[in-house]
Image (cartoon, helix red, strand yellow):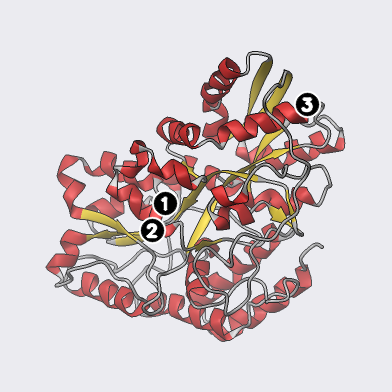
Amino acid sequence: MTQTTSRTISAIAGMVLLVAACGTNNSGGAGTSPGSSSGAAPASQGAAVSPASVSGNLTVWAMGNEGTKLTTLADAFMAEYPDVKVSVTPVDWGQAVTKLQTAIGGKQTPDVSQMGTDMMGQFAQTGALEAVPANIDANQFFESAWNTGVVDGVAYGVPWYVETRGLYWRKDLAQKAGLTAAPTTWAELTAAAKALQSKGGAKWGIALGPKNWQELMPFVWSNGGDVMAADGSTFAFDSPQFTEALTYYDSFFEDGLTPKQVPEGFDITPAFVSGTHPMFFSGPWHLSLLDEAGGADFADKWEVAPMPGKDAAPGTSFIGGSNLVVFKDSPNKDAAWAFVQYLSRPDVQAKWYQTVTDMPAVKAAWEEAALKDDPRVDVFRTQLDTTKAQPAIPTWSEISSAINDQMEKVTTGDTAPADGAKALQQAATSIGTGK
């Protein structure tokens, strides 16, 4: 997952409504079909490597919970490759960027590292990453996940695991309000929020973040908009598609369907269970959180549904996750790529899901029973076919902060959406892409 996502999940009990997340280098402009962005990004790859006979020592860095659990897969890898010794170093997400920068500057990088998808542009620019070898097939991964590792036409990252967002909604309160199915369009989402608040007994109709770009951009993508224009070098925040999506998002705040102010430390989980906030967008990690918080009696009172589209077309949701990269300074690249290939095997990806509940980036892994037999998880599998993320540009951290700043001025202040979009375009243009 991205550095942002992992920090958010670990602190989810103290976060606002929607968790933060991840990214991709897909930069299709307005008019790009939703689906899996605009297809796998055309990318050059390095020379093929063979994992048949490898040996030596490997140092692997992994972040967050993945860093503490990866030894399970490393041990299994070493059982198959007894001439390789893998040492896993857990890294805190909050220190990941600084630690990687220091390692690159001192030419003391690990052989393999987990890397948040929102970090790819920044670190590919350093020239420290090895191109993905040609014998790793891009087509085995979800297209939008693969695209997150492609920077300036070169594949530097291999998708390890993914996450996306769905709509959690209280179907029992919806039935009380006269609703029979989850909303599938923007109009239905607004109508559902109003009905849940006026007839369903909920204090609010939906929980939306006043400054959370990961919540806003799915509406932009579903409307044919994007972060970047079609030329891939200029921003598209002042496009009609972006402005319309921001206007729609703001309508929930203007109509009093979602709170304009979110208390510090607010946790959506108990609020959803109590019924005050009957709809919210989040990822698969909330499945277990709600089961635990609500108990057995709560299991039949809620469902998760795909992202509503603007009209009849499926909604485009956010994709995040983590990639695996190999560094140019690695003295043992063949063994490093063998380890990456091992982690990309469908059976290993399914085992990883059972270990840490990270969703597989390899499509074939979803045929394994651990994922295939859970209808709630299957909603996220369906949604993964219609996903996008942020562009892999070095300045993304600054750009995302600018989006959040203008969102807040629109949703909680007096700034009109069109003015907010123009101000965002100016801010983003001033920041630039870093290329």
Q: Is residue 412 visible?
A: no
**Numbered disc total:** 3
Callout 2–callout 1 Cβ contact below 8 Å:
yes
Residue 92 on image: x %, y %: 62, 34
In primary-sequence order, the first of circles 1 and 3 is: 1
Callout 1–callout 3 Cβ contact below 8 Å:
no
Q: Considering the numbered disc 2 on the image, is that residue within a helix, a strand or a loop?
A: strand
Alpha carbon of mark 2 to alpha carbon of mark 1: how far? 6 Å
Alpha carbon of mark 2 to alpha carbon of mark 3: how far? 40 Å
Q: Quadrant of the N terminus?
A: top right
Question: Mark 2, residues whose alpha carbon is within 10 Å: few (<14), some, or many (≥20)?
Answer: many
Q: Examine the image and state in which quarter residue 417 appears.
A: bottom right
User: Which one is nearer the viewer's eye here, 415 or 341?
Assistant: 341
Residue 132 on image: x %, y %: 72, 44
**Which residue does the numbered mark 2 point to in the structure image?**
166
Extreme residue toward the top, this view: 82
User: Which one is nearer the viewer's eye here, 405 or 413?
Assistant: 405
**Which residue does the numbered mark 3 point to in the structure image?**
332
In primary-sequence order, the first of circles 2 and 3 is: 2
Mark nearer the viewer, 1 or 3: 3
Alpha carbon of mark 1 to alpha carbon of mark 3: how far? 36 Å
**Which residue does the numbered mark 1 point to in the structure image?**
283
Q: Is residue 263 left or right of residue 69?
A: left
Identify the residue shown where x is 75% and y is 49%.
45
Q: Amino acid at mark 2?
A: Gly
Q: Is residue 332 left or right of residue 369?
A: right
Q: Is residue 276 left or right of residue 423?
A: left
